[in-house]
Image (spheres, rainbow, N blue to C red):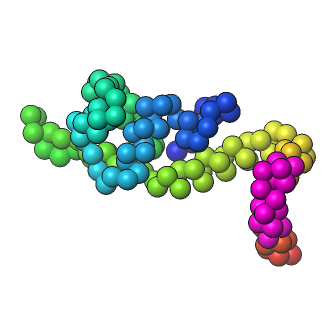
């Protein structure tokens, strides 16, 4: 479930997902399973959208590994249900780790310096979290 496109200028989920992808995933993260038709009904309450567009996006999210799907029945009774492959928290943990790892691999010391500066500027309390993580890492590596 690695997202290959990261949009720095966006915020929240939109850094990793397009607008409709994010809307669909938000629905799945609070629902168990939904068919394309059920998703269409839910999203149409907010703003109209083509069922074909929703079907395409849901299948792309499946291809990306963000959704699981299973099909029941055959022929005219065939029905496919989708569900989230992970929780929102798991998704964000994996994606932020991938972004952080990529920045560190590419920019090393510069990334670490800017990360510490950014922590100090935005939430100085996170410095304690960083110190705790560094102490744990040092203990493990002894």
Residue at 62% over, 33% down: 10
Residue 128: in magenta span:
yes
Judge whether 93 appears above or below 12 on screen: below
Q: Where is residue 7, by image quadrant?
A: top right
Residue at 85% over, 40% down: 107
Residue 111 relative to residue 74: left or right: right
Judge whether 48 appears above or below 41 on screen: above
Q: Can you give x and y, in whole percent of width and height, for residue 59 in the image?
A: 36, 34
Q: Where is residue 8, by image quadrant?
A: top right
Residue 9: in magenta span:
no
Q: Is residue 74 visible?
A: no
**Quadrant of the image containing the C terminus:** bottom right
Of 23 and 5, the residue lying toward us: 23
Q: Can you give x and y, in whole percent of width and height, for residue 56 in the image?
A: 35, 27
Residue 113 relative to residue 123: left or right: right
**Which residues are drawn in magenta?**
117-132
Residue at 50% over, 31% down: 18
């Amino acid at each position: 479930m690695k997202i290959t496109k990261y949009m720095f200028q966006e915020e929240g989920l939109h850094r990793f997902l397009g607008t409709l992808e994010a809307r669909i995933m938000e629905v799945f993260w609070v629902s168990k399973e939904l068919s394309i038709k059920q998703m269409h009904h839910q999203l149409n309450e907010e703003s109209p959208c083509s069922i074909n567009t929703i079907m395409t996006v849901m299948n792309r999210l499946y291809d990306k590994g963000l959704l699981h799907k299973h099909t029941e029945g055959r022929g005219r009774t065939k029905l496919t249900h989708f569900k989230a492959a992970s929780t929102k928290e798991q998704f964000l943990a994996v994606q932020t780790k991938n972004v952080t790892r990529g920045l560190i691999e590419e920019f090393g010391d510069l990334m670490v310096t800017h990360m510490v500066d950014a922590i100090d500027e935005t939430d100085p309390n996170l410095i304690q979290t960083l110190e705790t993580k560094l102490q744990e890492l040092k203990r493990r590596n002894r």
